[in-house]
Every structure is written in C-alpha cells, then in structure tokens.
Image: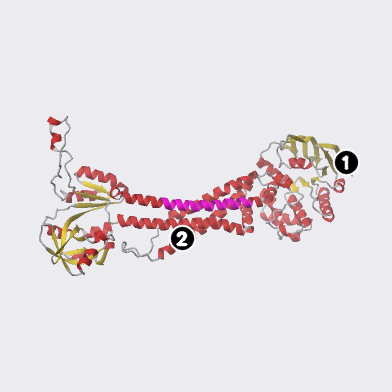
Amino acid sequence: MTNWKLILSIGKTHLLTKIKQTSIAALGVTFGIGSYITLVCFMTGLNAMLDNLILNQTPHIHIYSEIEPSKNQPVDMYYGVKNSFNVVHSIKPKLSQKNIHNALPIIHYLNANEKVRGAIPQIKTQIFYIAGSIELGGNLTGINLIEELRLFNFGDYIIEGSAKALENTDNGILLGIGIAKKMSLKIGDRVQVSPIGGDVFPLKIVGFYQSGIADVDAIQSFANIKTVQRILGRPNNYITDINVKLYDIEKAIPLSKKIQQQFNLKAVDIKTANAQFETGTTIRNLITYAVSITLLIVAGFGIYNILNMLIYEKMNDIAILKATGFSGRDVQFIFMSQAMIIGFVGGILGLIIGFGLASLIDTIPFKTEALPTIETYPINMNPLFFIIGFSFAMLSTFLAGYLPSKRARKIDPVKIIRGQ
Amino acid sequence: MTTVLEAKHINKYFKKPVLFHVLKDINFKIEKGEFTSIMGKSGCGKSTLLYILSTMDTDYEGELLLNDELITNQSRDYLSFIRNKHIGFVFQFHYLLADFTVLENVMLPAKKLAEKSLQEIEFDAYEKLRTLNIDHLAKKKASHISGGEKQRVAIARALINNPALIMGDEPTGNLDSYNSENVFDIFKRLSLEEGLSLLVVTHDEDFANRTDKIIMMEDGRIVTNPRQMI
C-alpha cells in the first residue's frame, strides 16, 4: 500500500524549495533532449534529402540488355577436350541486340506484379548535337513522360518550360541546361540532333533539364519515346531499358535476381548500384546517434549528481520520515519521483525547444544549384524522434535517480538521529 | 493494568570496531498511562536501548512485545507501520521537516497511515496544535519557528496518530529551563489526562525524578529495578 499522493507531494515540496537546483537538473535534461531532437531532425532531414536526390530519379530495378562475352565458349562444350584446360585468347563480346527482346510483354508482365508500382520503358541512345560545323556528343533518352512524372518526380528537374509542352509537341526535346548554355539556345529554338551514322533531325526545344550534376547536364537530353524511335528509325517495340519502381525498396534485390534469371537480361537493383551511398547514410545516422546519446548521458549524470546532493542535504528528513513510519520503499519512491518529475518536466521542455529549433532551421533559406526543388534547410520531423527523446529522458532520469534513491532507502535512521 | 511495551532478555552487541556487549539481559515492562524515564551515564546504552524499543534498530537478541504482540523479527515494512500507528517520537534536536509548514509536519504521519480523510487529519492536527498552544504557528514554515516551539510541534506530530506510546530521546536536552518545564508539563498532562504511556531517555535528574518510574542503567544493565516514585 503505497500512498502515491503523499509521496508525490513530499517530492514536489523538496523540488520546489530547491527550485534552483531543480531547474538546473531539469535544464540539463532539456538541453540534452532539445539538442537531440534538433540534431536528429536536421541530420535525418539532410539524409532524406540526399537519399531523395538519388532515389527519386533512380529506378529500384534497372533492366537492360548487356553487351558481354558469352559465358560458355564453344570449346567448353566440345566433349573431346572436356577434361583438359582450355585457354581462349581475345574473347570478343557476343553480337547481340542493344534493345530488349520482347520488351512490351515484359513491361506488361512486370506491371501485373503486385509489388511493382510501375515499370516504364526508356530508349537510351548516343547522339550528336549539331551547331553549325561543331558536333557535340551527347545522350538522348526517350521517355514516357506521364509515367516518369508519376514515378520518378521528373518534373522536379525541369527548370524552364513544362513537361506538358513535351507531351504536346511531337518533335519536342528537353535539353540539358549545360548544352543549352554551350550552344546559346533558348526555349522555342530548334536544335539539330543526329544519331550515330544517321540523318539530321531538327527538334524544338520545349524546356531545360537540370539534374544538379553538371557532367550529366552537359550531355543529357530527353524526348518522347516515339520521337527517339523515329530518329533511330526503329519500330515502336524498340526499347533499350526498363525502369521499375517498387512499393518496397527492400524487395529490389530478390526481384532483380528473379528478372535476371527469367528473362536472361541484366537487372541491377538500387542497392547494388548505390552501395557506397547507403554506407554514407548509415555512417551519418551513426554519428547522429552517437552525439545524441552523449548529450543525453551528460544530462543523466547531471541529474545523478544533483539528486545525490539532495539526498545528502535531506538526510535529516529521511531519518524523520523513517522514524515516523515511512518505510524504506516510501523514501526511495519519494526520491525516485523527484528524479522522474525532473525528467518529465525537462523532457517535455526539451521536446518543445527541439521542436522550436527544428522549425526555425526549417525556415532558413538554403539554395543550391544541385537541388532545384530545395528552398530551406531540410528537416525531418518524425514523431518517432519525439517519442524516443522523451523515453530516453525518462529512462536516463530513472537510472540517474535509482542509485541515489536506493541509498536513501538503506539509510539507517538511528545512525542519523544519534549522530547529531 | 495493561502492558504496552515489554522487553524480554534484550542483548545487543556492537561488532565494530571491536565486539562489545552493549546491552546485557534487559527486562522491563511499561504499563498503560505510565511515565517512565531511562537514566544513566553517557555510553551506558540507554539510547541504544531506546532505539531497539523504537523498532528502528532490529539488530538485537531477545524479544520485544508491543501491546502483547511480538514484534521481534517482523518485516521492516511492518515495523514501519507499527512505528507509524503505535509509536510517537520526540528527539533532542526537534527534527521537523524544514521545507514543510508546521501543519504539514504534524499531518505527515497521519497521511502516511491514511486511515482518515484529509479533512479529518487536518482537523486533528489543529486540535493537537491547540492543546499545545501553538495553533497560531500552523501555517508557518518549520524552519521559521523557535526551538521550544519546534519541540512542541514535534510532540504534536508524535500525537497525531493517537499512539500507544511516546518515546523521547532527551526531548528537553536542547531547551532552556522554561521550555523544558513546558515540555515536561505537556508530557505529564498527556500521561495523566489521556492515559498515554511515555518512555523518555534523559540526563536531567529533576526531570526524571518527577516521572512515575525511573529505569537506571549502568554498563548495559538495569541497576535499580523499577523504583516507584510518587
């Protein structure tokens, strides 16, 4: 039978009469939690921004037909030399088509898969941009614009002109900003492109594309898939790449393996393609948590210290309480409740301060060429961080209060009373 | 007469720094309404005995009975309950909780016992303060009143749960003669009018001589077995 109301009222009185110490202890928690929230919101916001930079425009699975040498050379199949050691010099890649065989049925099949958010075709080809007598090498990618907009946020990277204009213009091209600068072109102008060993086609510029990576912007342009097929003189089932976006990025590896086996095509999943990127994210998260936990531990020691002092000062009170019938448990609960109150108040204040600071950072302008859609510093306000922060405040104050309060429980009142 | 407290063959040893036999076969009884004092020279073990009787010190041999109930070897939580309900304490150095008001100090043991509602407890506390003529101090902080007043507040606190026994460890040791007299009168009145049993350790011979019974101790033994005083 623990009388919580009484214990809390005693704890409260102790805290209020020592309001300075109490505030310092609570502020320790507040700063710990506040900086944890700010830091983690800001860091994960940055991480998410960097992730999105890659993930938004990167397919979860990229399927294409790889030009590579045959794995089994004919000599290996010859029974006569089966048990001997064969060396073949100067292996050349096998002559195969660049496009994906039966691409349309494959796309259809993938779109029927319930894990797949969308599978869309692309045609990648090398072209020359022709400006007078100068030929600039580059890439032209034929895209299905509506699907690209839906799945890969393509619209974020069109800095001038509109996606709609490309959809409506038969011979339209979205020119990389780098090429446009080199050739002094503006929207509405015509640019002549020529595929390798092909004719010259004039295309109308309907917009500019900027990925944020200068090397890409200096060569890359986009046009409708049909336009590219026409430039290349290919039929409308000529597809070189299929980009797949999934609902769950974790399913990319197994599905890519399955596709590779099933269709005898090269299928690269996003994790393999961006392995170094994932390592960066992991390490950044690790740093965030290491710093946060350090802050919280420091705050925890502050509470431990102050509670220890409080117990030394309150030896008399402890002895009286015990003499007048409070059990050791009651006394322990009194001091535990003080620690928990400090943790609770400090934690809540910390959450508010963290929220305030994070909101403030969210309004600071942050303009960068590389990220056309970002205007302020990115903040990731995940409710989970607030829950973790608060739980840690309570946990650390619990631990910081436990040891001193356990000592208070064990104090022998006779020693204190007779000691005076 | 009913026996409130009975000690049977109490022995106690201090183990540090060397083994020392402090209390040697202590036997006595305290009857209801009896005002008893324990006297003896410093170091004769009288305070040690008091703290064993108070149930706070459990490290002893022998048997202790409160209201004919054996309380030796009871759990600490139960002993806390017994102290709360049946025993009131008054110490030499007043021992109030400095951060609380006088009223809160008095109410605390009753709140712990939680047998009455808060209003009843507050009423009782005022009642006790009034009988000791200190009800005007009720709202003052315990650290802001004089020594004599503190001791009277401590007595009020000891009385709040209507205990069977009040124990005092030199309750007048730190007070001037006027306040000592005052405290003694209060004790005497409680014993006579309310039938309360009192057990007080004291150095003050005048004080002891006016009590009902003196237990004289020397070297851990009771030397003058209950000497009746009028």
Question: Looking at this view, is A23 or A106 the one in front?
Answer: A23
Residue carrying label 2: A355
Q: Quadrant of the N terminus of chain A?
A: top right
Determine which residue is flagged by label 1. B228
Q: Which amino acid type is marked by label 1?
A: Gln
Q: Secondary structure at mark 2?
A: helix
- Residue B52 or residue A9, whichever sits in front: B52
Q: Secondary structure at mark 1?
A: strand
Q: Main secondary structure of the magenta part?
A: helix
Residue A41 image offset from top left, x and y in percent: 42, 57
Q: Residue furthest front?
A: A89
Q: CA distance from mark 2 to mark 1?
A: 76 Å
Residue A202, quarter of the rendered image? bottom left
Q: Which chain is mark 2 on?
A: A
Question: In the figure, residue A136 lies in which quadrant?
Answer: bottom left
Residue A109 is situated, as x and y percent measured from the top left of the image, at 21, 48
Residue A303 lies within the magenta run: yes
Residue A385 position, x and y percent, is 44, 54
Q: Is residue B103 visible?
A: yes
Is residue B144 one of those drawn in magenta?
Answer: no
List x then y, in percent, for residue A283: 39, 50
Magenta range is: A286-310
Residue A176 seen in this snapshot: no
Left or right: residue A303 compared with residue A62: right
